[in-house]
Image (tube, grey):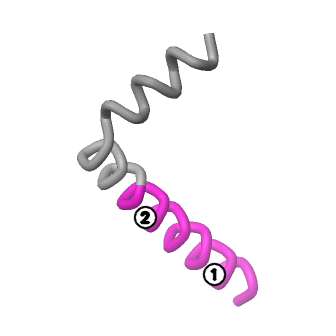
Amino acid sequence: MRQYIMYYTHTQTHTVLCKSLRSLKKVMPEAIYVGKQNTI
């Protein structure tokens, strides 16, 4: 049972992260580009 809960929370977190990443990429590609330029 514990493994199931762990798996469930893991997948939930994963989907949330993916969704937020996707929306971030949609909303601010320029900011990401600038950030990449700054890290180099």
Q: Dot 1: few (<14), some (14–19), or many (≥20) neighbours within 10 Å?
A: few
- Secondary element under disc 1, as helix, strand or loop, is helix
On whether residue 2 falls in the magenta region, the answer is yes
Counting from the top left corner in percent of width and height, residue 9 is at: 60, 77
Outermost residue toward the top in this view: 40
> Which quarter of the rendering shows the C terminus?
top right
Q: Residue at x 70, y 89 (%)?
A: 1
Outermost residue toward the left in this view: 26
> Would you name the residue on which mark 1 appears?
4
Q: How many marks?
A: 2
Counting from the top left corner in percent of width and height, residue 36 is at: 51, 21
**Residue interval drawn in magenta:** 1-20
The dot on residue 37 is none
Outermost residue toward the right in this view: 2
Q: Majority secondary structure of the magenta segment?
A: helix
Q: Dot 2: few (<14), some (14–19), or many (≥20) neighbours within 10 Å?
A: few
| Front tag of 1 and 2 | 2
* Rendered view: 5 above or below 15: below
> Would you name the residue on which mark 2 appears?
15
Q: Residue at x 45, y 67 (%)?
A: 16
On whether residue 11 falls in the magenta region, the answer is yes
* Rendered view: 6 above or below 18: below
Q: Earlier in the sequence, mark 1 or mark 2?
A: 1
| Kind of residue indicated by mark 2 | Thr
As rendered, which of 33 and 17 lies closer to the eye? Answer: 33
Location of residue 19 by image quarter? bottom left
Q: In the picture provided, is 21 more to the left or to the right than 36? A: left
